[in-house]
Amino acid sequence: MIYKVTAKFLDSKAGEFFQKLKDGSIQNQKPDGPEMVDSMRRAYIQESGLIMWSELCYCNPPLAHERSTVLDNYFTGIVTESIDGYEEYEGDSFWNYLVDKSK
């Protein structure tokens, strides 16, 4: 199942989060690491400051494993909504934001 995810990013953890996205720490997590990294590449920052992305997940409740291992360390107020397929969102690239914050 694919979910639309909306959450508030803990900005103070941008460097740490981006490092884990780049160094394989998240990518190598089984079974959902590659999807989490791909999801962050698809994520966008809305004008409101919320981050939105689409993510494939088979957990019940949605993103249970992802949240317990990664997402709850870097995001708050995570809301999921079932959707039919991956979506693109308006806003600025979250990945580019992380690159800039990590400089």
Image (cartoon, helix red, strand yellow):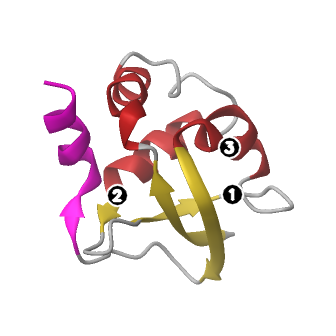
Q: Amino acid at mark 1?
A: Cys
In x, y percent, where is residue 10? 45, 44
C-alpha gap between disc 3 and disc 1: 9 Å
Determine whether the residue tagged by mark 3 lies in a helix, strand or loop: helix
Residue 66 position (above or below residue 92)? above
Question: Which one is in front in this view, the residue at disc 3 or the one at disc 1?
Answer: 3
Dominant SS of magenta comes to helix
Residue 102 position (above or below residue 11)? above
In x, y percent, where is residue 15? 32, 26
Query: According to the image, label 1 marks what residue?
Result: 57
- Determine whether, in the image, residue 65 is placed left or right of residue 98: right
- Determine whether, in the image, residue 2 is placed left or right of residue 38: right
At label 3, counting other C-alpha atoms closer than 10 Å, the crowd grade (few under 14, some 14-19, many 20 or more) is some
At label 1, counting other C-alpha atoms closer than 10 Å, the crowd grade (few under 14, some 14-19, many 20 or more) is some
Q: Amino acid at mark 3?
A: Glu
Determine whether the residue tagged by mark 1 lies in a helix, strand or loop: loop
Determine whether the residue tagged by mark 2 lies in a helix, strand or loop: helix
> Residue at 60% across / 71% down in the picture?
3
In x, y percent, where is residue 48? 32, 74
The answer to if 96 sits in the magenta stretch is yes
Whether label 3 touches label 1, CB < 8 Å: yes
Query: According to the image, label 2 marks what residue?
Result: 42
> Residue at 70% across / 32% down in the picture?
69
Q: Which residues are magenta?
A: 91-103
Residue that protrudes farthest toward the front in the picture = 12
Observer-nearest of 37 and 73: 73
Residue that protrudes farthest toward the right in the picture = 60
> Residue at 30% across / 72% down in the picture?
46
In x, y percent, where is residue 72? 64, 43
- Determine whether, in the image, residue 11 is placed left or right of residue 70: left
Query: According to the image, label 3 marks what residue?
Result: 66
